[in-house]
Amino acid sequence: MKLWQKVLLIAWVIGLLIAGYGIITSEDKAIYRLKEWTPDTHYRVLEIYPQNAQVPKTGRLGAFYSCLTFYQRGIDRSVTTPITAINESFEIRVDEDIVIDFGVNGVEAYSFDFLIYGKKREIISGTDIYAVNCDIRLLDKPDSDMHCEDRLLGNSIRPVCTYRPEQDNNTNNEQ
């Protein structure tokens, strides 16, 4: 192999490595929409299973939004509560063009992905599946009702956020 061929081959391999690293480490373009929201962003439940889940049908994202910002990409989507049923999920619409689909176990959302729709209701973009550990009862609640602690889940330490009403927190602190 001639010297110029070796140089070209090395440059090609380096280019592939850089491109592969960029694909692996870059976030979905759609996930940037999450960063535009706030706890005051409105949502509406489109579908929920089981149907008796205690989630307000409409409201503000509230403390649930704060928990979602701890999302993790490309890691095990572990639940921290005992398995309650198979295929629990719920979908919410945020803005007019985004639907978020959550994997749920009991009251814990452990994964999500979302789709961005166009004006004609066609899918424009979607995300990978992300891991979270958020209590769905945090929807439409203030951040003061959220309690987070770091836990070892799989091979990583992640925040797990649960619903603890502020008055319960104050009661526990006084005892």
Image (cartoon, helix red, strand yellow):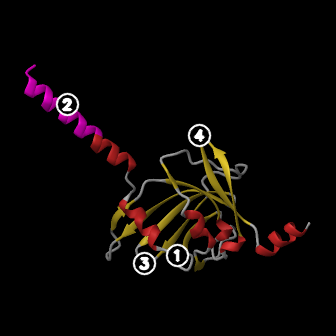
Q: Which amino acid type corresponds to the residue marked 4 in the rendered image?
A: Asn
Query: Residue placed at 67% from the left, 76% from the top?
Result: 142
Disc 3 + disc 2, Cβ < 8 Å: no
Among the 4 quarters of the image, the one containing residue 15: top left
x and y percentages locating residue 26 in the rendered image: 37, 52
Rate crowding at label 3 as few (under 14), some (14 to 19) or many (20 or more) other CA atoms within 10 Å: few
* Residue 11 magenta-highlighted: yes
The residue tagged 3 is 96
Rate crowding at label 1 as few (under 14), some (14 to 19) or many (20 or more) other CA atoms within 10 Å: some
Q: Position of 161 compared to 165: left or right?
A: left
Q: CA distance from mark 1 to mark 3?
A: 16 Å
Q: Which amino acid type corresponds to the residue marked 3 in the rendered image?
A: Glu
**Stretch in magenta:** 1-17
Q: Earlier in the sequence, mark 1 or mark 4?
A: 1
x and y percentages locating residue 155 in the rendered image: 59, 40
The residue tagged 4 is 155
Q: Is residue 92 above or below residue 76?
A: below
Q: Which mark is residue 10?
A: 2
x and y percentages locating residue 98 in the rendered image: 43, 71
The residue closer to the viewer here, 50 or 112, is 112
Q: Main secondary structure of the magenta part?
A: helix
